[in-house]
Amino acid sequence: MLKIFEKEEEVAEAIANVMAASLKEDYPLFCLASGSTPQKSYQRFALQAKHTDNVRKLRIVSLDEWVGIEKESEGSCYQMLQRDLFSPAGIEPDQILFYDGMSDDLQQECEKIDAYIKEHPITFSLMGVGMNGHIGLNEPGTPLLDHSSVVDLSNETKTTAQKYFEEPATLTKGITLGLNQVIASKKVIVAITGRHKADIVKEIFNRPEAGLPAQELLHHDHIDFYLDTEAAKHITQKVEG
Ligand SMILES: O=C1O[C@H](COP(=O)(O)O)[C@@H](O)[C@H](O)[C@H]1O
């Protein structure tokens, strides 16, 4: 389902409410995008959930990470989530399983996450969408994988991602869940906000033949797209909202 909200803040509020509801499941396991889009959702969720018994039950599994970037350094996917969610919500390190982008054995990092989610199904995923339509770090042209992989980053991603770092970062590869692993989550929200995403949103919704990773998440009953009017301004299809 596509839902369009007037303002980015309303998208954030709606997502925070879904996260809070998902937290009440017996074994909540969340897989969450880092980046700019979900920041306000995480702030609101943290306000509702921080240090509750339910938050203590929550487990988090990695969606993606930059290869060659220290976990604790600014701009890593882990560090963005630490700043925006883990710390404000009181989520402790023993609740989190993340790819280590500095590992000497990246294949083992893939297997570590894959083995975990095989045993523990993801109950809620929140995805952002890259400026080129990527999901996680599944760049355009990536097949529907049902395992993690180490991927070459597109030039667009390398450039866009510089906004996360104070100093220019050398980004060449990433490590990411496969699209089928995201789709296999019990519930998924794909969030897209802001005028700067309007052109890629137009591709996703108005040009089905574009073959973008984000389009693989369309047309599943358990996957909702939440957009604000700025991002949705070129959509021509009928929507709920
Ligand atoms: O590179 C990435 O970008 C997307 C979108 O980022 P945003 O800053 O525009 O929200 C993000 O969802 C993805 O996880 C990340 O790898």
Image (tube, rainbow, N blue to C red):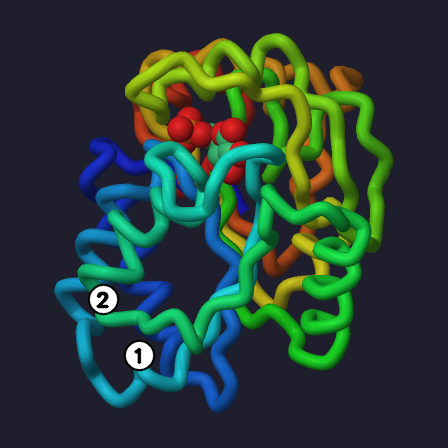
Where is residue 113? Give x, y as percent: 69, 63
Would you place residue 105 above or below residue 128 in this image? below
In the image, is 53 to the left or to the right of 32? left
Secondary structure of the residue carrying numbered label 2 = helix
Residue farthest toward the front in the current orientation of the protein? 104
In the image, is 177 to the left or to the right of 194? right
In the image, is 101 to the left or to the right of 81? right
Secondary structure of the residue carrying numbered label 1 = helix
Mark 1 C-beta to ligand 1 under 8 Å: no
In the image, is 158 to the left or to the right of 232? right
The residue identified by callout 1 is 55
- Residue found 51% across the figure and 44% down from its top: 127
Where is residue 84? Give x, y as percent: 26, 49
Q: Count residues near mark 2 (Cα–Cα under 10 Å), then give few for <14, some for 14-19, many for 20+.
A: many
Are circles 1 and 2 on residues that touch, CB within 8 Å?
Answer: yes
Please state, as top left, top right, bottom left or bottom right, where the C terminus lies in the image. top left
User: In terms of depth relative to the viewer, which is nearer, 108 or 41?
Assistant: 108
Q: What type is the residue that disc 1 sits on?
A: Val
Which numbered circle lies on residue 89?
2
Where is residue 199? Give x, y as percent: 49, 10
